[in-house]
Image (cartoon, grey):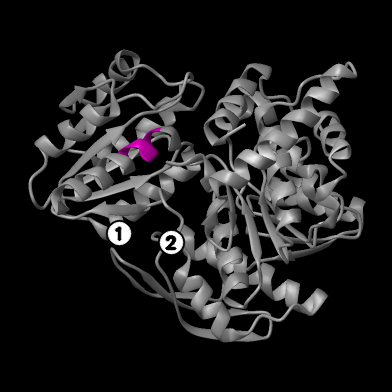
Amino acid sequence: MNYREVLAYIHHTQKFGSKLGLGNITALLDSMGNPHRDLKVIHVAGTNGKGSTCSFIASVLKEQGYKVGLYTSPYLEEFTERIRINGQNIPEGKLAEIGSFVKSKAEEMVARGLEHPTEFEVVTAMAFEYFKREKVDFVVLEVGLGGRADATNVIEKPLLSVITPIAMDHMDRLGNTLREIAYEKAGIIKPNGFVISSPQMPEAMEVIQEVCKKQNAKLIQASLNHVRIIEQNERFQRFDVKYGNNSLKDVKIHLLGEHQVQNAVLAMAALYQLNQEYHIAIDMDALYRGLAKTVWPGRVEIIHQHPTVLIDGAHNLHGMKALEKVIQQLFPDRKLILGIGVLEDKDVEGLLRVIVPLAEKLVLTEPDSPRALNVQKLASLVEKYKKPYVAREKIPEAVQAALSLAEPDSVIVFAGSLYMIGEVRKQFQKKIQDQSI
């Protein structure tokens, strides 16, 4: 199969749904020779900040000179973003080759009477195979959904289990209480392992502590008590921090928002533990450079100026509150035009309650997903806020509408779903290219 045929096959596997559990992925990987067992993995779970934390860790390891695989989801613009080595997407030819190999193994499973792997299981297996073939030094592995029954949890002995902030999300799959959700996330904790956790709500931390005790795992909490933010602007943040035996001055990151400082500190704690427990070399220069060079598109990302356009994948209450804080810090006196599109299985009213009051005008649209909430229903939910709005089903039309409403000093923010902001990002990249011709 060529690249397009493999992509078609992967998307075709969506019909097999999204099943939590390790039976299928275990059988698939076994038929492939268990490529995951040859990998040194840093496994990252949590509700918000997983991708950013993964990116910080991978960037620092790369700057140290290691060959680093990074597996994340979903993608913003190109499918190949999900599987990367040292910041480079998997080449289309490699994806075609490995995709064909995995497809053949999946078909063998079905011939033996087993279920066909789901889309996420197929892609996860492809990532493991690619990283093994390329002989990476480390893999930074983001959990897809939950943790305990996520396909990535087939990893038996990660170097570290990292847990970012846990909040209410995916309640239909993970549970209706913070404690239940934390139990699923803590499922990545392995016997005698090392666990690095962000500060958590008390109920979530209790669960993590209980699981660590049961698994005889060592828990390290990444404290934010010794962080001092020096500067925040539209381009970067600078902060001082103490962690482990280190005191770092004037650390710079280009990911915006106080929550990204917290993600960076969590990554630093994980890297420190890699050094302490496994004697993995990580020097201060690599740490500073890696943090400063970290990029994570679509998360509080400014993609245009005059007017300022910011996109953010905030799709749950915790993420939207973080975005609210960024807007209030960076643009306290600017007129805000809010472009919003959400999935219908989210806490839509909760998201609107946080973000809509900040806006002067609204542009309603629909994410590129079968789970999208249609603009008519979204309009009915925003009516009570008495804000002027326009509704455009198609994202390119929503972008045009937002720009037509904007003044040079306006701030346009598109948020609510990762399935929307990737297309918004493409639209502005196209505009920049068109203007340069």
Q: Quadrant of residue 375?
A: top left
Residue in view at x 11 percent, y 41 percent: 406
Find the magenta span and give its range: 420-424
Instruction: Tell me the quarter of the picture where residue 381 sits.
Output: top left
Magenta span includes 257: no
Residue 24 appears in view: yes
Residue 224 x/y as whole percent: 57, 68
Judge the density around disc 1: few (<14), some (14-19), many (≥20) Cα neighbours within 10 Å: some
Which disc number belongs to residue 401? none
* Amino acid type, callout 2: Glu
Measuring from the top left, give residue 92's x and y in whole percent: 54, 44
Judged left or right of residue 73, residue 101 is right
Q: Residue at x 37, y 39 (%)?
A: 421
**Residue at x 67% of width, y 71% of height:** 271
- Residue lying at the far front in this picture: please name it: 1
Task: Examine the residues drawn in magenta and state their main secondary structure.
Answer: helix
Q: Residue at x 76, y 46 (%)?
A: 186
**Residue placed under numbered mark 1 in the picture:** 329
Compare residues 428 and 333 and report the one nearer the observer: 428
Q: Is label 1 in a helix, a strand or a loop?
A: helix
Question: Mark 1 or mark 2, which has the lower sequence index?
Answer: 2
Q: Which mark is residue 258?
A: 2
Image quadrant containing the N terminus = top right
Q: Are marks 1 and 2 in contact (CB under 8 Å)?
A: yes
Is label 2 in a helix, a strand or a loop? helix
| Residue 128, position as x, y percentages in the image | 73, 48
Amino acid carrying mark 1 in the image: Gln
Q: Alpha carbon of mark 1 to alpha carbon of mark 2: how far? A: 10 Å
Label 2 environment density (alpha carbons within 10 Å; few <14, some 14–19, many ≥20) = some
Q: Position of 277 compared to 289: left or right? A: right
